[in-house]
Image: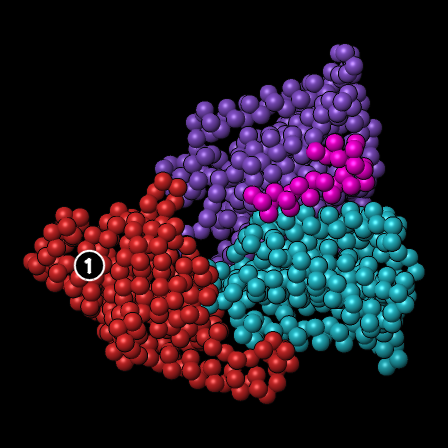
Chain colours: A cyan, B purple, C red
Amino acid sequence: MDTVAGLFLNDYVMQIVTMICINIIIVSGLNLITGVTGMLSLGHSAFMSIGAYASALLMMKAGFPFWLSIAGATFFAGAAGALLGLPILRLRGDYLAIATLGFCEIVRVIFLNLPAAGKALGINSIPYATSAPVAVILAVLGLLFMRNLERSKFGLALRSIREDEIAAEMMGINVARYKVLAFTIGSAFAGLGGALYAHQITFISPNDFGFMKSIELLCMLVLGGMGSLIGVVAGTVTLTAIPEILRFASEYRMVTYGTVLIFMMVFRPQGLFGNIRVNV
Amino acid sequence: METIVQQLLNGLTVGGIYALIALGYTMVYGIIKLINFAHGDIFMVGAFVGLLAVNLIADSFIVAVLAAVVFCGFLGIFVEKVAYRPLRENSPKVVITSALGLMLIILLAVFARGDVAGIVSSGTFWIGAVLILAVMFWLIRGRVSGRNKNGNSRINALISAIGMSIVISNMVMLLNGPQREVYPRLLPDYSFSAGPFHISALQLFIIAVSFVLMYLLYYIVHKTKTGLAMRAVSHNLNAARLMGINPDRIISFTFLIGSCLAAVAGVLVGTYYNIADPNVGMMYGLKAFVAAVLGGIGSIPGAVVGGIVLGVAEVMGVAFISPSFRDAIAFGILIFILIVKPTGLFGTKMKEKV
Amino acid sequence: MEKHDKILELKNVSLHFGGLKAVNDVSFSMGANEILSLIGPNGAGKTSTFNLITGVYTPTSGDVLYKGRRVNDLKPYEITRAGMARTFQNIRLFKQLTVEENIILAMHNLRKIDLVRSVLSTPFYYRELGGVKKQAEIYLDYFGLMEHRNIRAENLPYGKQRELEICRALATGADVLLLDEPAAGMNPSETEQLMVTINRIRKELSKGVFLIEHDMKLVMGISDRIVVLDYGRKIAEGSPEEIRNDRRVIDAYLGKEVEENAEA
């Protein structure tokens, strides 16, 4: 019994579990934006970085306690999502994707040049506070929140926007408002995840949150199956664990990763658990 | 004043290169509405193949360009067949071609580093191979029988493209190592003075080559039969098919041309900066893509103007604002143009009919 | 009460796209419990007129009045809230939502549940949802869609999809339904069924129905009045009998079809 517990509860495994839970929170936010509402975002990591920096600075510079810091980070990321959403959410499909991509790079460059954020060096020795239980509890709460939101009248409105924006508007849905709502909540989740990340890894730098990070998050979502919370969990677990498993073959890691992505898109385009199409 | 003109020339040079890469994006997008994220990496491969040719054959610009163009042309077609076509079409032939291509990639990766005999004789290799084959077989059956339905067409293609981009750039790193390589000076670089300005012949050459190739492309698309077919496919793939055009061939041709232009750009950049870097593909690709959007994606003159505007803006921004904001300038312009005029400078308006 | 009879009124409405006059100085009105048809050759500006009324376009000049209130500048969702809902020429259902969800979505603005209680799934959430489902059942039952309620809208047969679209428009609580070519692609027996349905909606639910249609049998069979457009202008208005015999209408396009009808 001891050995079994030892096997599953050692630090390394706990660290991976924490990482998975953090990614579940972030990817479920992306799922709300892309899988539920049908807005393709390539800039999700920008909100993650806003959350990470906000929380680190709130805790280290303003002396906030952990819970208040991550709440503040969630708020800041959500606010940033709303502010960005207002002008760009009238763009559709690829154009929206490109604009979010641009935003992601701009945020990275801003943090690279911000003295308070430590410029290229980032922030070191952030207090460690994201223990595995904290991450697990927040991930479960996050998933519950998303499940309840999706089945509510608001979630139904968001899904109808994904299906047909014009028809949704004609059925009395204020499409613009709901898109901003979805984008705000999704960004806030990314911010929360980013904050937890900062307090787990304890050092952050702008290049941790570049465009490729956004892509990685999107890959988790698509691999699991868009629009499905089970898919969010499955995709996140798979893509967080694969690089760890492949660590022994570090040279081949990225090539394998890329091949797996193409492979999945060609042979199982709906993802592991997905049963909807998202046409952006 | 003098610095402004000087910087303008630098901007034109960078812009010409962006434009050459942007053309590939714009053509592929115009024809299958796909952002070909692997395009930037094909550009990077072009630089490395040129370098390899110079080392193996002769220290000549022509040799480097020819080798890069031929290799990247094939690479472009390969990418399309392996990563994009199976998302459009479900026939067993297409799907199996893609599977074989992916296996080729895996094999190349496995053998990229040395000891081939040792790997082949190891049990792990064969167990892995059998496992991969079994999974592939199972999935191919699901795919061909239609059990795995077409998913989210656009997003799937996008992720497939990103997968390709990751594969290509990391394959180069496997084969070459992650370090930058010094690029030989393939062209003599005179600079001469005209009044207060120093003009580099290399810069003029790059600008000239860019414009000639762009004109050539414009000619192909607008004056030849193949070009007409390309425009037809871009307009309506199925209608074009009914008119006796083979859209797959046209799409392959588009990837071929786009990749060739990117290959030339790769060799030019290597020669200009004297460096080949396996990591730059993504960033150059993104910038060129911004240029394509700026000009109106799908439009050839748009890509050229977009590339030049972006190049000049970037160089001016670096010179007069701050070098550390270099990347932000490009993306700032991008967001601005998307909000003000989403279809870009030369794009045509597409509004959904109610 | 004269004023209330005119539930929808267009006063000298024009819509210009650059030089093109899609709708040119068109005026007509519609009674609260009327079946009004809008006909005309292809490109006459029928769908543009619908788009003007439902807020997709804003008139270049003139006024659109709903229940005496000027609705020119309202957004499409505000028009729906005000009480007019539409269907589309090429069906626009929420394909991957179930039939029932399509109806429940249409009831969005009638539902009284806030975000917080939804996310917390309080008892009130379940009570409210129960009520909404019951209401949706009434609508579905009315259209004979109950047995299909849990399948995705995209899996319905074509005729049923058309009916679901009408049902969905009705579920918004609208007083006026705008149906854009509801019989397009239907076979004769489905069209027959559609005529019965439209008549029932008017009589039993006392709604107004405004429809664009090419099927003359349907138009002549159920309309109280008909408005004819040609090149963006109104060229005639009147009862089916009057339109059938109107010289200008016959000249414009109806001629052949009226004769065909007469033979049949």
Residue C107: name its quadrant.
bottom left
Compared with C148, A159 (above or below) is: above
Q: Is residue B328 magenta?
A: yes
Residue matched to label 1:
C237
Does residue C106 appear to the left or right of B11 in the view shown? Answer: left
Residue C167 location (% of width, % of height)? 36, 72
Q: Quadrant of residue B174?
A: top right
Q: Give left or right: position of B12 versus C153.
A: right
In the orientation shown, which residue stands out farthest toward the left?
A: C263
- Tag 1: residue type? Glu
Instruction: Identify the magenta region.
Output: B313-341
- C254 horizontally vs A256: left or right: left
Q: Which SS type dominates the magenta stretch?
A: helix
Q: Is residue A234 magenta?
A: no
Residue C83 visible? The answer is yes
In the rendered view, does B134 fall on the left or right side of C235?
Answer: right
Q: For the point 39% across and 63% down, which residue is it?
A: C70
Query: Which quadrant of the rendered structure holds the N terminus of chain A?
Result: bottom right
